[in-house]
Amino acid sequence: MIAAIEPSWYLVLASLLFGIGAFGLLVRRNPLVMFMCIELMLNAANLTFVALATKLGDINGQTAVFFVLVVAAAEVVVGLGIIVSILRRRPGATADDLAELKG
Amino acid sequence: MTTTFLEYLVFFAAAAMVLGGAIGVITMRNPVHAALGLVMTLFGVAVQFVAQEAHFLAAVQVIVYAGAIVVLFLFVIMLLGVDNAMDLSIEPIRVQRPLAGVMSVGLVALVTAAIVKADDSAVLQPGAGLDVAGAPPTQGASGELNFVAGGGHDSNIRQLATNLYGDHVFAFELTSVLLVVAVAGTVVLTRKWPRHLAERPIGDDAGDVVDGATDNGGAG
């Protein structure tokens, strides 16, 4: 008989996902891909919230995921707006070129 | 035995989707392919939500993340025409990648050690319990519904809604403010200002300061 799936397995999976997202955020230079890596890290946090909600029997964890979703949507909208206004003027700009943002 | 085997199958298949998609995001040279890897990761996370009885969040994950956010990403990629492959061998800072690898591996190892350490410790403050699909709720004397553990087939949505609109209703209203501010800010950021407005920064009535941020590609 094999053991049942433990909530800590989900936590380990979430930590792996967060590590991959953090690595991508540090090494990729395309601002769009960097944003996708931030989404990966947010999803790792969501997975942690749901796993601990299951482990502790507390619905507040799932409610927190709901708010993370809303904040992620708002963040993506504003971030992509900034990226659009940068890339429209400088096509092919990488993260290294964004120092131009300073007034 | 079969239930546990199925649980294992679901967990490891979804975990492979999550990690494979995530690796795809950071290794694909084309941003469109990276976005498709992101879709795979998001679907894998949705499957993990279903496996943990968070049915409503799984649906929202697919609709909002895979539906809206990734479509927004793809829309921006197509709009700007940046869907050409990037050269990943360019490395402006020499030690950046090894340092990033060390940092993320160390982070994962640290968090995993903490999980293993905390796994056998006692739960300090257990919650009230999650309603999972099962028997329908019983009706009380004054007509209220009593959700015992093992509520109806939509008990997860009911419990989440009761929590969200009860304990967290003020935060819920604040999120609408956040979304309105985000939409207004994006419109201000991305609209093309008319020429006589673009010559000076927003809110500067004197007009004697010509802002470099509003010229047309001089720095490029």
Image (cartoon, coloured by chain):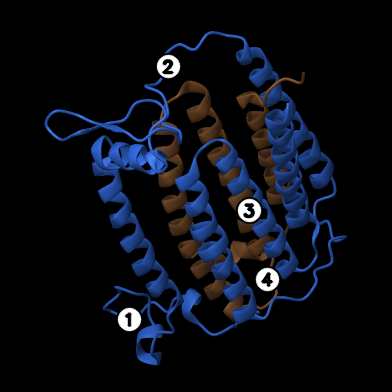
Chain colours: A brown, B blue
Instruction: Give coordinates of residue B92: x percent, y percent.
Output: 80, 57
Q: Amino acid at mark 3?
A: Phe
Of callouts 3 and 1, which one flags the residue occurring earlier in the amino acid sequence? Answer: 3
Same chain for the residues under marks 3 and 1 in the image: yes
Dot 3 or dot 2: first in sequence order is 3
Query: Which is closer to the viewer, label 4 or label 3?
Result: 3
Given contact means CB atoms under 8 Å apart, are the residues at marks 4 and 3 in contact?
no
Distance, label 2 to label 1, CA atoms, is: 61 Å
Residue matched to label 4: A93
Residue located beneath label 1 in the image: B207
**Side of B177 relative to B157 (left or right):** left
Q: CA distance from mark 3 to mark 1?
A: 51 Å
Q: Which mark is residue B126?
A: 2
Front-lying residue, A48 or B184: A48
- Residue ID at (64%, 20%): B115
Chain letter for the residue marked with disc 2 in the picture? B
